[in-house]
Image (tube, rainbow, N blue to C red):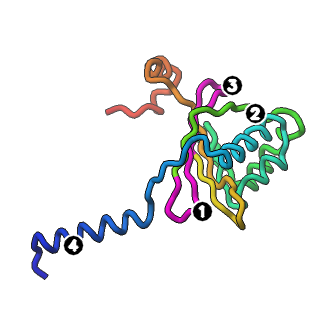
Amino acid sequence: MKFTSGNFLYLLTIAFSLTSLSFTNVQVASSNKEFDEIIDAWHHAAATGDSVGFFSRMTEDALYLGTDETERWTRTTMGKDLGKFFNGKKAWHFIAYNRIYTALDDKNTILFDESLKTWMGPCKSTGMMRKVKGKWLISYYNLNVAVSNAVVQNYLKLLKEEEILKD
């Protein structure tokens, strides 16, 4: 097949069409009450040590990434490893603000990111909720300590030299 500008435009049109089928990046208002209530209740369950309230808001195959490089839990392993912290007392307490949602085209998946006030200082998290049997559940959560650009140089002094990428 000879490559012409017409072929190029045709291929470009197909590529854009396929891209729009998989992900539209639709912004949902951050005041979306249903999603806010689910995530806020999940955070509240951790703050009150409510294991049922916390783990029941996660899919069976949920994945939670903590701030430490070694912290990677499925819902099951998190329950085993951290269940002792969910004893009716505070496991941890996060206050979320500036939450933004992005809906995927399948209408059964919502991505979100949020800023958090925590005992570690400011944090950022990204997450994903999936609709399972008509119910929205958290299926992925990645928590990171947010280091302000203004203090990065001081932060770097706390790290081991081998942890820092040198150009």
- Outermost right residue: 88
Q: Quadrant of the C terminus?
A: top left
The one of 78 and 103 positioned closer to us in this rendering:
103
Q: How far is disc 4 from disc 2 in space, using C-alphas?
A: 54 Å
Residue in the image at 75% along x and 52% along y: 57
Q: How many marks?
A: 4
Give coordinates of residue 44: x percent, y percent.
77, 38
Q: How far is disc 2 from disc 1 in space, using C-alphas?
A: 29 Å
Residue 118 belongs to the span the image colors magenta: yes
The one of 43 and 149 positioned closer to us in this rendering:
43
Relative to 5, is 41 on the left or the right? right
Residue 69: give its label.
none
On the image, numbered disc 4 is attached to which residue? Answer: 10
Q: How far is disc 3 from disc 1 in space, using C-alphas?
A: 33 Å
Q: Earlier in the sequence, mark 4 or mark 1?
A: 4
The answer to whether residue 108 is above or below residue 52 is: below
Q: Earlier in the sequence, mark 3 or mark 1?
A: 1
On the image, numbered disc 1 is attached to which residue? Answer: 108
The quadrant holding residue 50 is: top right
The answer to whether residue 5 is above or below residue 85 is: below
Relative to 145, is 59 on the left or the right? right
Give the secondary structure at mark 1. Answer: loop
| Cβ atoms under marks 2 and 3 closer than 8 Å | yes
On the image, numbered disc 3 is attached to which residue? Answer: 119
Give the mark toward the camera: 3 or 1: 1
Give coordinates of residue 124: x percent, y percent.
56, 35
Range of residues picked out in magenta: 103-126
Name the amino acid type tagged 3.
Answer: Trp
Residue in the image at 64% along x and 27% along y: 117
Q: How far is disc 2 from disc 3 in space, using C-alphas?
A: 8 Å
